[in-house]
Every structure is written in C-alpha cells, then in structure tokens.
Image: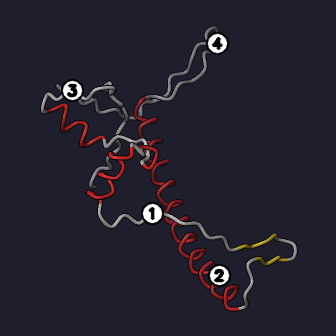
C-alpha cells in the first residue's frame, strides 16, 4: 500500500528562549531542496558532458599529431607531460564460444564479478533459488518533478 504525504512549507516556529534547539527544516523545505540540488547537478552534468566531448576532440587531435611526428611523449611547459600508451583489450566476437572456453578451462577470472539485477529479479519471480546469493532490498528516494 502506498501513501502520499503532500508537504508544504510552513511558517517556522519561534522556539522559546529556554529551549533553543537547533532548527530542523520542515519536510516540504527539504523536499524542495532535493529538487533544487538535483537541477543544479543536472546543469553541472551538462557542462561536464560538453567538456568531455571537447576534451575527446582535442585528445584525438593531439594524439594524431604526436603519432604523425613519431612522438610517444610530449612535455608541455608549466603543465606536465602527455604520453601515448597502448593496451590490448578483449573484443568478443562469439559469446557462446567464449563462455564454452571459460567453462572448459575454468578461466572464471576472465569475467568481472557483477550480477545482472534485472536477470536476478526475474529468477526470484520464477521462484528459482540462486545458490550463493542472498536477496538484498535497496531503498532509495525517487524525485519526480511536477509537470507544471
């Protein structure tokens, strides 16, 4: 059963001089503050996204120039150094074949240890017990802006 409480900002009470307890914001004020913080975060994330795109473009340009000039390291006066590094990463072309190899050789270290939450919930709903796993209910507060 879901209940809804509509909180409104109320007039702050003036504490008596004898009991000057710390002022705790009312529920409506804290709720409004959460929406305000979320909007500020969203604006900052937009700025970060734009900066990351700009950085990616400049990184690509610098890397291409360094490679064209056969440089693997560049020292920028007063800033630091830029260097090109390479590492081999897996690009799986056939997952069935890959999983068969892991199972046969017992090379479980090739996989990252993370459970798919939607898939796990699906098994729980089908009353399938997954050995070695304990369900945990994660609780969080959701914010949804009104459409006004």
* Residue 40 located left or right of residue 121: right
Near mark 1 (Cα within 10 A), the count class, few <14, some 14-19 or many ≥20, is few
Q: Residue at x 14, y 27 (%)?
A: 127
Per the image, the residue denoted by label 2 is: 63
- SS state under label 4: loop
List the single residue furthest toward the left.
Answer: 126
Sequence-wise, the earlier of marks 2 and 4 is 4
Q: Residue at x 45, y 42 (%)?
A: 34
- SS state under label 2: helix
Q: Is residue 1 above or below residue 144?
A: above
Give how far apart the Cα atoms at labels 1 and 3 are: 32 Å
Front: mark 1 or 3: 1
Per the image, the residue denoted by label 3 is: 129
Sequence-wise, the earlier of marks 1 and 3 is 1
Q: Is residue 9 above or below residue 77?
A: above
Q: Nearer the viewer, residue 12 or 41?
A: 41
Sequence-wise, the earlier of marks 2 and 1 is 2
Give how far apart the Cα atoms at labels 1 and 4 are: 68 Å
Q: Is residue 51 above or below residue 1?
A: below
Q: Nearer the viewer, residue 52 or 76?
A: 76
Percent position of residue 21, x then y: 60, 15
Q: Is residue 80 above or below residue 22?
A: below
Give how far apart the Cα atoms at labels 2 and 4 are: 67 Å
Per the image, the residue denoted by label 4 is: 17
Q: Are marks 1 and 4 in contact (CB under 8 Å)?
A: no
Q: Are marks 2 and 4 in contact (CB under 8 Å)?
A: no
Near mark 4 (Cα within 10 A), the count class, few <14, some 14-19 or many ≥20, is few
Sequence-wise, the earlier of marks 2 and 3 is 2
Front: mark 1 or 4: 1
Percent position of residue 109, x then y: 46, 45
Per the image, the residue denoted by label 1 is: 90
């Amino acid at each position: 059963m879901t209940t809804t409480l509509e909180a409104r900002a109320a007039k702050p009470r003036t504490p008596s001089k004898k009991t000057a307890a710390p002022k705790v914001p009312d529920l409506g004020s804290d709720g409004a503050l959460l929406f305000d913080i979320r909007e500020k975060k969203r604006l900052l994330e937009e700025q970060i996204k734009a900066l990351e795109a700009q950085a990616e473009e400049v990184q690509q340009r610098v890397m291409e120039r360094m490679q064209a000039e056969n440089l693997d390291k560049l020292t920028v006066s007063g800033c630091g150094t830029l260097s090109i590094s390479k590492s081999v990463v897996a690009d799986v072309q056939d997952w069935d074949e890959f999983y068969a190899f892991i199972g046969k050789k017992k090379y479980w270290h090739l996989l990252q240890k993370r459970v798919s939450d939607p898939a796990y919930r699906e098994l729980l709903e089908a009353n399938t017990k997954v050995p070695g796993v304990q369900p945990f209910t994660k609780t969080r507060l959701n914010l949804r802006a009104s459409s006004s």
